[in-house]
Image (cartoon, helix red, strand yellow):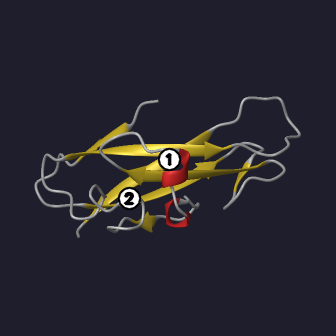
Amino acid sequence: TEAVIVINNGNVKETYSIKCSSSSRWSLGSSPGADTFSIQSAFHSSEPTAGNFENQDILTDALQQCTTAVFSIDGTHNGKEVPVNAQRKLWLSLKTPLSTSTTAQQEMSITITAGSP
């Protein structure tokens, strides 16, 4: 497992917002179900266990702003007020559907935007 490295290459502190989308048969949900997947993301310096992710780490199809708790394993690494040239490791935890009506490959996208703190 490898983290997604997110770098602030701007010239001011940035606060990130994150969302997920899917244009395939599977839909995004808060928990897995029939043709429904769930995905959690969180910043942390090292790979977290599945049990480290919490409800505030669940991605939705709307941008959610990072805080010291939202999208952070323990608050030590987060996407809030990230300094210039700093990098953060973003970890993902995918929970696949409990059942599926397709055998076709499914695609999902994670979007990260940066804004002023």
* Labelled pair 1, 2 in contact (Cβ < 8 Å): no
C-alpha span from label 1 to label 2: 16 Å
Amino acid of disc 2:
Ser
**Element class at badge 1:** strand
Q: Which residue is drawn at 54% across and 51% down?
A: 51
Point out the frontmost of discs 1 and 2.
2
Q: Residue at x 55, y 46 (%)?
A: 50
Q: Nearer the viewer, residue 78 or 49?
A: 49
Answer left or right for 10 relative to 112. left
For residue 18, which numbered disc appears in the image?
Answer: none
Q: Residues within 10 Å of mark 1 (few under 14, many from 20)?
A: some
For residue 110, which numbered disc appears in the image?
Answer: 1
Answer left or right for 85 relative to 107. left
Q: Residues within 10 Å of mark 2 (few under 14, many from 20)?
A: many
Is 8 rendered above or below residue 17? above
Q: Residue furthest right?
A: 101
Q: Quadrant of residue 115?
A: bottom left
Q: Give coordinates of residue 8: x percent, y percent.
A: 21, 49
Amino acid of disc 1:
Ile
Q: Give coordinates of residue 109: x percent, y percent.
A: 54, 44
For residue 72, which numbered disc appears in the image?
Answer: 2
Q: Give coordinates of residue 114: x percent, y percent.
A: 30, 58
Q: Residue at x 42, y 59 (%)?
A: 71
Does label 1 or label 2 sit earlier along the sequence? 2
The quadrant of the picture occupied by the C terminus is bottom left
Answer left or right for 74 relative to 105. left
Q: How many labels does the image show?
A: 2
Answer left or right for 85 relative to 64. left
Q: Nearer the viewer, residue 20 or 37?
A: 37
Q: Residue at x 54, y 65 (%)?
A: 62
Q: Give coordinates of residue 103: x percent, y percent.
A: 83, 29
